[in-house]
Image (spheres, grey):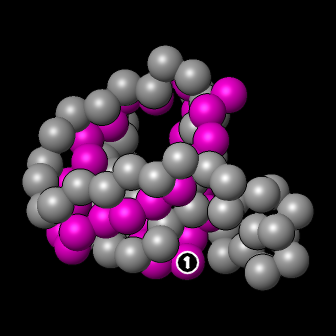
Amino acid sequence: MARVKVAKPTNEELKKLGVKSWPEWSCEVLRFPWEYDEDETCYILEGRVIVEIEDGEKVEIKKGDLVTFPKGLKCVWDVKERIRKVYKLG
């Protein structure tokens, strides 16, 4: 299974990806299971979350991170601080 990828993009990279046109999603402090039925790339606008992957790996995601989740990934989102992100599927 492909892994979650976290990067710190430059403003130029964000512009090239067109993140300003992506839909936005937000969530208050909450813990919930999630499964990705397609690839997702997201950019974190604010907040912090720990994503717990089935194999026990934990990935911290926070403001300024560009994150790629692979199709088929099963995980638990543990939102520590209200999260706001923009995202692109596929």
Q: Nearer the viewer, residue 14 or 20?
A: 20
In the rendered image, residue 30, in percent from the top left (x then y), is placed at 12, 54
Q: Kindly state the secondary structure of the residue where label 1 is placed.
A: loop
Query: What residue is rendered at 21% in x and 33% in y?
Result: 33
Task: Please say if 28 is above or below 47.
Answer: above
Query: What residue is rendered at 49% in x and 67% in y?
Result: 44
Please say whether residue 15 is one of the residues in the magenta stretch: no
Q: Would residue 31 appear left or right of 67 to someone viewing this image?
A: left
Q: Nearer the viewer, residue 89 or 2?
A: 89
Q: Which residues are magenta?
A: 61-90
Occupied quadrant, residue 17:
bottom right
Task: Please say if 63 is above or below 37.
Answer: below
Number of numbered discs visible in the structure rendering: 1
Binning the other alpha carbons within 10 Å of mark 1 as few (below 14), some (14 to 19) or many (20 upward) gives: some
Please say whether residue 62 is one of the residues in the magenta stretch: yes
Indicate the quadrant containing the N terminus: top left, top right, bottom left or bottom right. top right
Instruction: Tell me which secondary structure the magenta stretch mostly adopts.
Output: strand
In the rendered image, residue 78, in percent from the top left (x then y), is placed at 20, 55
Query: What residue is rendered at 46% in x and 53% in y?
Result: 24
Occupied quadrant, residue 89:
top right
Mark 1 sits on what residue?
A: 64
Q: Is residue 46 visible?
A: yes
Occupied quadrant, residue 90:
top right
